[in-house]
Image (cartoon, rainbow, N blue to C red):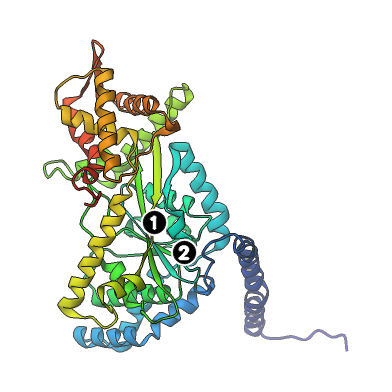
Amino acid sequence: MLEPVLIPLWLAVAGAVLAAWAFYEHVFMPALRWMVMHPANQVIDEVGKRLRIGIRPFQRTRRQALIHRLLTDPKVQQAAEAYAREHKVSVIAALHRVERYARDTVPAFNAYLYFRTGYWVGKRVAQLLYRVRLGYVDAENLARVEPDSTVVFVMNHRSNMDYVLASYLAADQTALSYAVGEWARIWPLSALIRWMGAYFVRRNSNDELYRRVLERYIVMATEAGVPQAVFPEGGLTRDGRMREPKLGAIDYMMRGFRIDGERDLVFIPLGINYDRVLEDRTLLRSLDPEAARRGRVAALGTTLRFFWRNFWLMVRSEWHRFGYACVNFGAPVSMRAYCREHNLDFHRLSGDERRRAMAALGKHLMEVVGSIVPVLPVPLIATVFVRSGNKAISDMELKGEVSRLVEQLQARGAHVYVPRKDFDYAVNVGLRMLRLRRLVGERDGLFYAQSEELPLLRYYANSIAHLLETGTGAI
């Protein structure tokens, strides 16, 4: 009875492998899944009580399930079949390509990372670099937005800090899902961004199959009520002015909107502005066709020098934050009301008729966003120096010009942020910023624009130039 039983080595190895697999599948993975999901579920229960727009079931759905939904979507299936015929490959190969695109696109939202880690990091970074201010808020109209609506924040795009700033200031309202470009595909940044609910977009892709996968994901998210944030300009402004809209993502959202559906689609305009944009010189450099193109190593070197210079200023207690960063929230644009007012049904439109309707909608959205871009001290003073050209002006002349400019802007409905409600302080802090950056010099008590820095001064003046061009503040 106690004699040992001999079994073949191959059977022992196979048994050990099966036991290890069973432990991994039924013990380790469930425990790991619980450790990841339990804190997230606790956060969802906690923040759900205070969020204006709750976390949708779509955002809580497992990523693999969403990928499967894309793979089995009839329109994606049709696109895969068309791709297979065009490229003379099997449908299976085309579906493998679809799966790769779906995995590239679909996020893996984690409420714990968003509201605990992401919010904390975003808040600390934003407040370290800027004096962050929430300016104008159209609270009355925002309160009328139905909680079950699909809310999309549309905003101007000045800096990569826009993602951080908007998410931080909107965190008491909802969890935003962004479309981010391929710059964020570097590991581990890509994983973190997916956990924050963002989805990747291959901008300017001509692959019809990829565009259909992206379209169907955005349509699904829109129909499910997922709050999103988009930059209609499609990229960062290069010269400081707002760019013409690129309406790919918004067009996809409109394809998921039904006038008589269960959800309204509401665009909420956000206007963002800064006293200093971290990428300003790089953006201006990209406009110069004769400027040498820098590789990633050179760009990394520039970034490291920037951080080292500012760290050294901190060590010597000579560092100042980069001025003010301000966000304004404008009146929401309900698509139900818009479509009824203009007698439109985007779901039924096609061809040139749809393109004209989308162009009109894009123009309208850019106008309402442009009208609420905050007017900050540096753009105000930069405007005065750009207008003055090579002329040197005194402190009293500067304040007089800024005062007249503020009156002109306010008469046109612009939202001017005056720090501490002290006009003299606003002028002084803006002038200090420009002098610290050596954009403005002083000689014999008179201030003048450094001629070689006029393009950069013009860049900041351009952020509010559209507010001075029409009576409504529209671009």
Residue type at numbered disc 2: Arg
Report crowding for label 2: few under 14, some 14 to 19, many 20 or more residues within 10 A (C-alpha): few
135 relative position to 32: left or right: left
Q: Secondary structure at mark 1?
A: loop
- Name the residue that disc number 1 marks: 186
Q: Which percent across, then down, holds residue 100?
A: 37, 74
Q: Are marks 1 and 2 in contact (CB under 8 Å)?
A: no
Report crowding for label 1: few under 14, some 14 to 19, many 20 or more residues within 10 A (C-alpha): few
Q: Which percent across, then down, holds residue 327?
A: 40, 47
Residue 293 position by quadrant: top left
Q: Which percent across, then down, holds residue 444?
A: 23, 10
- Name the residue that disc number 2 marks: 144
Given the current orientation, which residue lies at the most extreme front position? 411
103 relative position to 7: left or right: left
Q: CA distance from mark 1 to mark 2?
A: 40 Å
Residue type at numbered disc 1: Ile
Which residue occupies 22% across, 48% down? 471
Q: Nearer the viewer, residue 233 or 9?
A: 233
